Structures are given as C-alpha cells and as structure tokens.
Amino acid sequence: MGSVSLDTDNLWSYLKTHGDDAWRHWPSYLDRFIPLALDALDEAGLSITFFIVGRDAELAPDRDVLRSVVEAGHQVGNHSYEHEPWLHRYTRVAVATEIARAEDAIAGCTGERPGGFRGPGFSWSADVLDVLAERGYRYDASTLPTYVGPLARAYYFRSTSLTPEQRAERSALFGGFREGFRPTRPYRWQLASGRRLLEIPVSTIPLIKAPFHLTYLLYLSRVSERLMWSYLRSAIAAHQLLDTGPSFLLHPLDLLSGEHVPELRFFPGMDLPAARKRDLFVRILLLLRQHFTLGPMATHAAALEAQAPARLGLRMAAA
C-alpha cells in the first residue's frame, strides 16, 4: 500500500517564502488550480490527500473550491495555518495555536477534520510532533529523507533578494544534510511525553535518498524525458525490492505553468507548457498505479498500523 498527497501551497505562500511583499494581498490561484487537479486525478483514477493551508480555508474566494476537494472523494490534511517554513522555530504554545487554528479552519470549510499533518517546507520539530499526538492526529508526513536539501535551498536563495533576517528564518528550508540519514520507510516517533506518532516520510529513492516527487521528475524531463522515465522506474524498482509503498508528493506547480502564474516563472519547470505538464502528471500517476495500490494517506496509515509492529521501528523525536 502507498499513498499520493498534494500540498495546496497557494500563490501568496510561494511569494511569502520568496520574500515578495505582494503576498500581503493574499493572491490566489486555487480557483484555477483545484479544478485542473480534480480533473487530472479523475483521469488517473486516484483518490488522494490534499494538505490544505488553514488561512486559505478561511478566505472567502477559496472556500467553495476547497470544499469541492472533499465532494470529489478526496481527503484533507493540515498544512499549518500561516504556511511558514520556519515552523520549527515556533514555541510550543505557538505551534499548538497554529495547528489548532488550521484544523478548525479546514474542518469548518470542508466538513472534514484533518487527521494528518505536513509541515510547510518540510518543517517540523519535537514540539510539532507532540502537539499532533496530543490532539489525536493519526500521522505526520513532514520528513523528506534526502541529502540534497541544502543544494535545493541554495538554488532557491539565488532567485531571491531576502534580507539577512529573512534568510535566517528560512535557513532550514528543505532540510539539512542530516535529513538524508532519516529512514525512507514509515516508522513511529517515540516522544518525550511518552506518546507515539506514526511518521510517513515523503518518498525518496531508498539507499541513495534521491528525491523523485513530481516536481523533481518534471525538472528532469526538461533535460530528457527518457531520463525522467528511467529514473522513475528505478525508484519504483527500489521500492519494490524493499517492499515499501511510496508516499508520492504533488504540488500545484506540477500542473500550473508560467502561462497560468507569471509571478512564479522563476521556479524550475515553470517554462514547461501546461498541456505537457498535465500529460506527464497523469502518465506518471498511472505508471505508479501499475506497480502499487495507491490511495489517500489515512488509508496508507491504516494499512501500516495493521502490519506486524516489528515492521514499524521506533525513533526518538529529537529534531
């Protein structure tokens, strides 16, 4: 069993992380993106988890389109309220407020209370995990076990004009080198409070820890589509060899292009035509479906919990 999830990062959240003050006007593309995503997922025959940002669930223009996610048969998860990738710098009180506020906003908008969480920019901390466990969350999905986080951050910083304070806030964006030493298989966190929480990492290729989420695959396709398909098939073979279902990650910019969102043309892959992105989006998901049973993350979590306990190792929650 594996899962597919989509982080519904909005235009304002990308601009905010990039240090562009235009984010303060709360620009949104969700009314354009969500129908595209639902149509492509329907073609791929998949029900997935949409990780929703709490503030979007409270903003009037986006409430109806976010509600359509659940109406279409998909699940929702908590992606924080403010979508700040420096969540790991929050105090425990601030973490608790952030998670609860987003949870209430998402439930009020969609009618479904989230039971899973993913930190913005893969940001997490022991306090985040403990708050989730305390609130009865079934799983966390914030870790990205790869060595390339610092390279991705450096590439990202080159396209910004951040102040020194903003760079300090974003200093852990995409994680550090030591993230590569974290497990690729799901496991349970052992928290200082005595609680435990299931962790379902975003999948990277086992052993070499190279990412293969859709954004990365689209970037490879710009070099060579043949290379991209070979790379994906290698990732599939590695997961099959280790008998591990993937947790495959999607983002809005995997479907949107520079023609949809000119403000984000600086992101890798935004020069690809929207029609080509959609074609690859569907074909990649169909290939994964040929090799794995895929569904929303809560279904993946239930399948993991039904396994023998020995298959889910324990790790102490120290960020």
Image: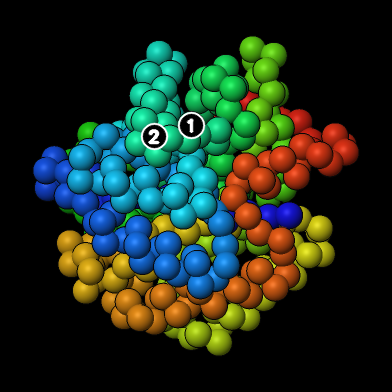
Residue 3 drawn at (x, y percent):
62, 54
Q: Amino acid at mark 2?
A: Ile
Residue displayed at 49% across by 65% down: 41
Vertical side of 80 occupied by 300: above or below? below
Circle 1 SS class: loop
For disc 1, the marked residue is 113
Q: Is residue 267 left or right of residue 187?
A: left
Q: Residue at x 40, y 42 (%)?
A: 52
In the rendered structure, are the residues bearing label 1 and label 2 in contact, judged by CB atoms less than 8 Å apart? yes
The residue labelled by disc 2 is: 106
Residue 215 in the image: x percent, y percent? 45, 65
Viewer-nearest residue: 165 or 264: 264
- Describe the element under mark 2 as helix, strand or loop: helix
- Tell whether 154 sits left or right of 133: left
Marks 1/2: CA distance?
A: 7 Å
Q: Would you identify the image quadrant in which residue 191 lies?
A: top right
